[in-house]
Image (cartoon, helix red, strand yellow):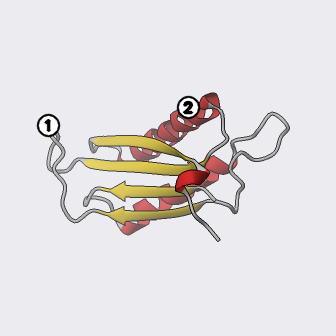
Amino acid sequence: MPHLILEFGPTFSPKVAQDLSDRLVTALATIRRPDGSHEFPPNGTLVRGYIADVMTLGGAGANAAFVHATLKIGHGRSDDVVSQTGDFLLAVMAAFLKETLQTREFKASIEIHDLTRVFMWKP
């Protein structure tokens, strides 16, 4: 089960954070394998987010916003799929933030952890 963890700056409201979380899990579900099956099944991703109490964003104004996403996935996807997933999710994040925050400056980033069974335990 993929895990998507979102870290929001303190300028985010819980509603906007939830809306972006929903948008990203929906976006993940649109990624398909060549055979048409889901790369990330629609009901198979656990998403959680945290709004930070403290933030300093170097060079940005006090009203700036940031969100950082970490996607943890099981081993087995090609480098191309992982790279395309990161590019796609970052584009979704940027479009959402531009649309939602309009005049506010924002920073968005994503990292993907490709886990191996050696370092992953689940029942």
Q: Is residue 12 left or right of residue 83?
A: left
Residue 44: horizontal and vertical position, in percent? Answer: 67, 61
Residue 32: horizontal and vertical position, in percent? Answer: 74, 40
> Mark 1 Cα within 10 Å, few/some/many (few <14, many 20+)?
few
- Is residue 40 visible in the rendered structure shown here? yes
Which mark, residue 9?
A: none
- Comparing 91 with 75, the one in front is 75
- Residue that badge 1 annotates: 59
Residue at 60%, 30% in the rendered image? 79
Three-letter amino acid code of the residue under disc 1: Gly
Q: Is residue 50 left or right of residue 86?
A: left
- Comparing 98 with 60, the one in front is 60
- Residue that badge 2 annotates: 83
Residue 51: horizontal and vertical position, in percent? Answer: 32, 64
> Mark 2 Cα within 10 Å, few/some/many (few <14, many 20+)?
few
Q: Which image quadrant for residue 35?
A: top right
